[in-house]
Image (cartoon, rainbow, N blue to C red):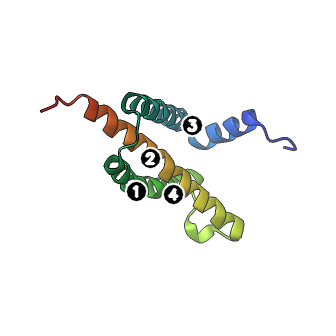
Amino acid sequence: MKDLDLAVLVSVFLEMMGPLFWFLLLLGLAGLIGFAVVLMREGRIDSRRLIRSEVIGLAGGVMALVLMAWVTVSGFTDAGGPVDWLLIGIIWGIGLAGTTILAYAVQGLLAGKRPKA
């Protein structure tokens, strides 16, 4: 495994997660597309919606860590060195960012369907 390319990463993730990999990939893509649609429609970022999304994102980071522990069949006590803890932080950050974007998109798309009073 001298070369690390996209095909190798996809193969490793498929081996670890199975069909869950494709679900998470599609969920992330849907979140990005939804965020782009909301941003183009409104032309700005709503601060209240962003704060709510960030709070939801904290839970998403924790869920990413739970998923990591379940998929790798290991716990946080198995982390041996600084690189392991760095990877745990990166996984939490990716879960936080992805969930924040997805939550903002869902809130924005649902807000657009409400009738104005």
Do labels 3 and 1 touch, CB within 8 Å? no
Q: CA distance from mark 4 to mark 1?
A: 10 Å
Q: Nearer the viewer's eye, disc 4 or disc 1? A: 1
Label 4 crowd (10 A; few <14 / some 14-19 / many >=20): many
Q: Earlier in the sequence, mark 4 or mark 3?
A: 3
- Which is nearer the eye, 32 or 37? 37
- Determine the secondary structure under disc 4: helix
Residue in the image at 45% along x and 58% along y: 62
Q: CA distance from mark 3 to mark 1?
A: 24 Å
Do labels 2 and 1 touch, CB within 8 Å? yes
**What residue does disc 2 label?**
99
- Which is nearer the eye, 97 or 82? 97
Q: Nearer the viewer's eye, disc 4 or disc 3? A: 4
Give residue 51's position: percent from left, percent from top: 36, 54
Marker disc for residue 59 = 1
**What residue does disc 3 label?**
18
Residue in the image at 43% along x and 52% along y: 60
Q: CA distance from mark 2 to mark 1?
A: 8 Å
**What residue does disc 4 label?**
65
Q: Earlier in the sequence, mark 2 or mark 1?
A: 1
Q: Amino acid at mark 3?
A: Gly
**In the depicted structure, whether residue 23 falls above or below residue 98:** above
- Determine the secondary structure under disc 1: helix
Marker disc for residue 22 = none
Q: Earlier in the sequence, mark 3 or mark 2?
A: 3
Q: Earlier in the sequence, mark 3 or mark 1?
A: 3
**On the picture, is 91 further left or further right than 40?**
right
Give residue 92's position: percent from left, percent from top: 53, 57
Label 3 crowd (10 A; few <14 / some 14-19 / many >=20): few
- Determine the secondary structure under disc 2: helix
